[in-house]
Amino acid sequence: MPLNPSDPVVEAAVFGQEVENFLNTRIGAYLLRKAQDQASEAIEELAVVDAEDPKAIRKLQNKISVSDQFIGWLREAIMMGEQATDALREES
């Protein structure tokens, strides 16, 4: 039975694969690496920041959070795509 491209499960499977393919491009790998580097650098800075400077602490925590969210969104899209692909395989 042919797949319906407008089926939400098919759309999720395709989107997840597109995200994974994007991460395998130079641009995708660069963005992922930059997010990981930003979080790592902020964690290192957090270890030595003045504990009495809540503004600096919040700024570093925000950098970590933004990076983690970006990476999490990518992982979520890939995971949903994999789950959708598994569901499609089970249907066939």
Image (cartoon, rainbow, N blue to C red):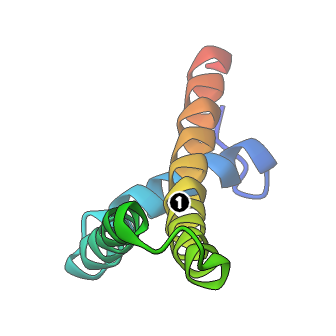
Report the quarter where the N terminus lies.
top right
Q: Quadrant of residue 35?
A: bottom left
Above/below status of 4 relative to 37? above
Query: What crowding class fits label 1: few (fewer than 14 Cα within 10 Å), some (14-19), or many (20 or more)?
Result: some
> Is 89 or 4 nearer to us in this picture?
89
Above/below status of 77 relative to 62? above
Q: Position of residue 42 (x, y in %)?
A: 40, 71
Q: Residue at x 25, y 63 (%)?
A: 24
Above/below status of 92 relative to 17? above
Q: Position of residue 79 (x, y in %)?
A: 55, 39
* Amino acid type at mark 1: Asp
Q: Residue at x 68, y 54 (%)?
A: 11
The secondary element bearing badge 1 is classed as helix
Residue on which disc 1 sits: 68
Above/below status of 47 relative to 75? below
Q: Position of residue 7 (x, y in %)?
A: 79, 49
The residue most toward the left is 26
The residue most toward the front is 52
Report the quarter where the C terminus lies.
top right
Q: Residue at x 53, y 60 (%)?
A: 68
> Is 51 or 55 nearer to us in this picture?
51
Marks counted in the figure total 1
Q: Position of residue 47 (x, y in %)?
A: 37, 60
Q: Residue at x 31, y 77 (%)?
A: 34
